[in-house]
Image: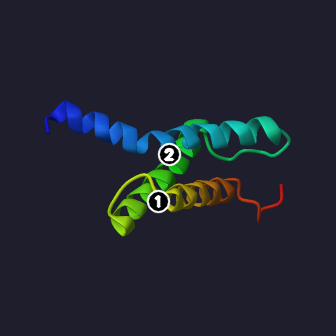
Amino acid sequence: MGPIDLLVHLAGFAAPALALGLALPLASRLLVPQRRIVTAFWLQASLVAGAGVAALAVGLWWFGRDGKMATYGLMLVAAATAQWALTRPWRRS
């Protein structure tokens, strides 16, 4: 496998987490506009996407293959938990 093929495979592996990483912070800003956001959009998106990629990597390690629905469920839970933690709901403004 050449370097371009490796890059294409890695991009395809991380694409769901990157899409979710962009969608969750954008949706939170549009659906709950009165909440004061304490982190920048790109930082928030990259942390949520990083949590999703980490969950995908754990699923790949655990199952030995990519594309299991349990892995995608774990990615969704990890990204949503990261998004929830970044909004800091325990702090009242």
Task: Give above or below for 39 relative to 89.
Answer: above
For the point 63% across and 38% down, the residue is 23
* Spot occupied by residue 86 in the image (x, y as percentages of width and height): 64, 54
Q: To which residue does mark 2 refer?
A: 17
For the point 71% across and 59% down, the residue is 88
* Spot occupied by residue 5 in the image (x, y as percentages of width and height): 22, 34
For the point 38% across and 66% down, the residue is 63
Any mark on residue 1, and which? none
Residue 26, located in which quarter of the rendered image?
top right
For the point 64% across and 55% down, the residue is 80
Mark 2: give few (<14), some (14-19) or many (20+) Cα within 10 Å. many
> Along the line of sight, which residue is nearer the eye, 2 or 25?
2
Q: Could you tell me which secondary element the residue under label 1 belongs to? A: helix
State left or right for residue 55 relative to residue 73. left
State left or right for residue 6 relative to residue 90. left
Earlier residue among tags 2 and 1: 2
State left or right for residue 19 relative to residue 84. left
**Callout 2, which amino acid?**
Ala
Q: To which residue does mark 1 refer?
A: 55
Q: Are marks 2 and 1 in contact (CB under 8 Å)?
A: yes
Task: Give above or below for 11 relative to 79.
Answer: above
Q: Could you tell me which secondary element the residue under label 2 belongs to? A: helix
Mark 1: give few (<14), some (14-19) or many (20+) Cα within 10 Å. many
**Callout 1, which amino acid?**
Ala
